[in-house]
Amino acid sequence: MPQKELPKLLYQIIKQLIEMIKLKYFTFLILVFFFNFISPRSSYSTIEKLQIRIFAHLKINSFQWSAISKSYKLIADNTPLEFNISNFNLFIKGDSIEIKEKDLVLGTFKQINFLGDSNDEFKIKLTQPDRKIRTYQNNLTCSVVNGSIVLINNIDLDNYVSGVTEAEAGSKSNLEFYKVQTILARTFALAHINKHQEEGFYLCDQVHCQAYHGKPRDSKIILAIQETKGKVVVDDNLNLIIAAFHSNSGGQTANSEDVWGSKTSYLKSIVDTFSIQMPNYNWERKMLTEDWLSYLKLKFNYPSDSILARDVALNFTQDNRKVYLEFNNLKVPLKIIRLDLQLKSTFFNITKLNNDSILFKGKGFGHGVGMPQEGAMKMGKLGYSYLDILDFYFKNIQIIDLQKLDFFKDE
């Protein structure tokens, strides 16, 4: 190789090396950006507001909105609107919403927002369909989807949790029970925060998610929120648990795998004496014998014509919770029977009343998994703490603050 061509060759090699270094450095920067900003992070403590669809089960054509607080702003299609009063009527108009201040039409818009501060409250009265007035906190967004007005309550996490606690557990209970219910409601909300993501909100106000009817009335719930602020329940792997609860266990809770098919380390069957003799402990249901046997035959191909099979079906007992009604190799799932016949629980015995009818004599109310609310209420009245109650009904769990959870998750 001629000597004069060597510097030129070295120059080309050095240039290529520089380009490679630049490319690798650029790739490195892209990866850093991706993992720090694009990839999902489990930062629960930064979630301050939830988007909850309210009246999710109804097709809404019109409603009244009124402010309890005076600081609300009205934003329609991203434009602030001036108003003199804090009471509006809203009507569906095609794919938009018409808003009136008394008889004055303010306009027709695709989206309307009522924006307040963290302590602000408003009332909603559905007029078509007609429903009672409810009080909500924080903000409201209104739009039209599939021919119906969709209402989204953009609400602080703990304001939502307080509303869920009363809707799911009722009012006039004891403080320790409310602490348990608030922790479970918070845990459920954060664990299922993307349940309706494709529809443009986080959760709905039906039992499909958690029941939610707006601001609670019992002041003890607000105190329970304050004393359990930021607390959630996690399993041994620091994952938010399935915060399952029901009304009454009938004296024994159920394993999660026996009801939902998925096994967990914390939803285990236990003997629950606290639910005994509470309001929803006992139930009865009569049924014609032939209707029962026909149901089994049609639904499960149960051999109802066999004398032995009929005897099993008409004299079924459970001293401890069972999963199936069994005859030979045939297993009839009790959870399907409960669903089809609308029974209060799967924890029942069957006895013959006479030749024509049978009696389902049952215990408990609900699916039986996790915490029975009536048992937890009883424990609270007897002086057990919310930590005692959670540790009794959920096994292998930890109660942890959201900020600490984020720290350990990041580690």
Image (tube, rainbow, N blue to C red):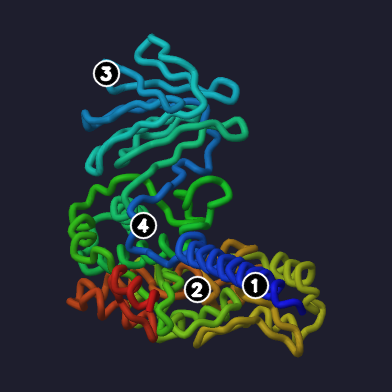
- In the structure shown, which secondary structural element does the residue marked by tag 4 occupy? loop
> Pointer 2: what residue?
362
Labels 2, 1: front one = 1
Q: Please identify the residue farthest to the top as the structure is shown.
A: 103
Q: Rounded to the nearest whole Å, what is the CA distance between mark 1 and mark 4?
A: 60 Å
Give the distance between the C-alpha atoms of the residues marked 1 and 3, in whole angstroms. Answer: 83 Å
Of labels 2 and 1, earlier in sequence is 1
Residue at position x 58%, y 61% in the image: 342
- Name which quarter of the figure residue 277 lies in: bottom left
Judge whether residue 137 can be spotted in this image. yes
Q: Earlier in the sequence, mark 3 or mark 4?
A: 4
Q: Amino acid at mark 1?
A: Pro
Relative to 300, 362 lies left or right: left
Measured Cα–Cα span from mark 3 to mark 2: 55 Å
Q: Quadrant of residue 147?
A: top right
The residue carrying mark 4 is 47
Q: In the rendered view, does 301 fall on the left or right side of 45? A: right
User: How far apart in space, not on screen, are marks 2 and 1 (Cα)?
Assistant: 94 Å
Q: Is residue 282 above or below residue 411?
A: above
Which residue is tagged 3? 85
| 138 up-or-down from 45: above or below | above
